[in-house]
Image (cartoon, rainbow, N blue to C red):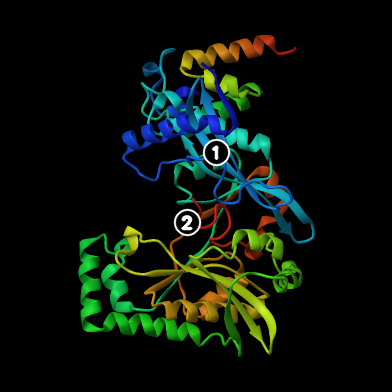
Amino acid sequence: MAIVIQPYRQEHEPAVQEFNRRLQQSSGDPNLVFSQNAIPRWLPPASNNPVWNEFFVAVEGSSVRGAYALKQEQIFTRGKGLHRVACYHHPLSEGIVDRAYASVGALLARDALARQPFLYALGMGGADRPIAKMLKALGFSLTPIPFYFHVLHPAKFLLEMQALRQKRWRAILMNLAAATGTGWLAIKSAQAVARLRGRPGNFTAEEVSEFSDWTENLWNQVKDTVSLAAVRDANTLRLLYPPQAANIKRLRISRNGAALGWAIVGERRQDAKFGNMRVGSIVDCWASPENSAAVVRAAIQSLEKEGVDLIASNQSHQGWCGAFGSAGFLKGPSTFVFAASKRLTELLQPLDETRPSFHITRADGDGLPANF
Amino acid sequence: MASDLFGVPVDQISAASSAQTLDNWDSIQHLNLVLAVEEKFGLQLSPEEIEQMKTVGDTAKLVESKLQAAPR
């Protein structure tokens, strides 16, 4: 029976539940699950909204064999203005657990491209993971988005950072460094030396309950300093970070009363690779390059007050990368990749020139893990 | 083409070879097979046709029928 990809409707929900059950049972991976609700919980379609999610399912008879989501949104590209694009996210295929459905992955990706040729994907666990490889085969350009981390509690970092402790000899060295205090000294020294490179100037940071019209001015003042950014005007920010989102903090950073920038910070969910550490995240940020250092310092101070052990962030813009470096962040291996379709890549040409000023953060794409 | 894509000697590939019988025939290689067929024969495959490519034989038959139907 033919497989047909169509918008996910309420009548498909039982078949999606059954699809999820088959994937989880065969793979043992609890993350292989598509939304059980046909209407997206995060960014549902609504008239006049500038950003929304749509779900699609691959149906064979009465069974669902695959599914994916598109986040429809607008991007700004310097010199070329606003364009409507879509983020391809959460693709899932029965082919993961049953080779008879090996064709479904290709069908999903091609269907998404047919619906929106200006397509991108973000994250994907790295360029060597199946989705990134598939998109590369379809002609997508891949750009890794640098990962930065800042250690607040070195001893706990050395003892709990499971991602670095997988080799026995390294775990022993890290235990030794934590016990003797040499690890504390080395990490704090490296961060202190980095901080000497930049001074943020005076600033004031306050937590705000919502993003109001001042963010509109910032969007308009700053957007020409980036070659690519998902729109971050006041209307879009109110949808992405609504007042009821309790798991994040919205920071307004100002100098002499005038807004310089904003940041979104929050605490990440427990993740085995970070052990028992509390990990804070600078999820999103916006400011002109000369004010980015103040925004980064304000975000660190906010997360420090929360008592996190480690702060992580993904940043692509060279100005922000510099600000994170000069705030004492260290660069780590990134598994966060930006994949742009052929049409979107054409729009972003010449890539060698535009790439350094892409403004892409952890909040782009499918956004915060809590959203799904 | 199948031999190159799936990394299997030609004499181990038959018309019945499929994702169930070839270890390397996964979702990514299925997409690569589609792209390779389109490029080599100058064809554009529809979703229905992509799904029909269950075996090497199915794929060969599909290509033959598309080439015969193509205007000369």
Report, in whole angstroms, how far the alpha carbon at label 1 lies from the one at label 2. 18 Å
Say whether residue B14 is left or right of residue B45.
left
Q: Secondary structure at mark 1?
A: loop
Q: In this picture, is A348 found above or below A330?
A: above
Which residue is identified by label 1?
Answer: A38
Secondary element at tag 2: helix
Q: Quadrant of residue B45?
A: top right
Instruction: Report the mark closest to the observer, 1 or 2.
Output: 1
* Number of marks in the rendered image: 2
Badge 1 density bin: few <14, some 14–19, many ≥20, Cα 10 Å: many
The image shows residue A168, relative to residue A303, as above or below, that is: above
Subunit under mark 1: A
Disc 2: host chain: A
Q: Earlier in the sequence, mark 1 or mark 2?
A: 1
Position in image of residue A28 (x %, y %) = 31, 40
Question: Residue at 26% of width from left, 71% of height from top?
Answer: A159
Left or right of residue A56, residue A49 in this image: right
**Residue at 61% in and 67% down:** A317
Q: Amino acid at mark 2?
A: Ala
Which residue occupies the foreground of this view, B31 or B11? Answer: B31
Please give the label number shown on residue A121.
none
Amino acid tagged 1: Ala
Image x and y of residue A170, in percent: 25, 66
Q: Which residue is mark 2?
A: A370
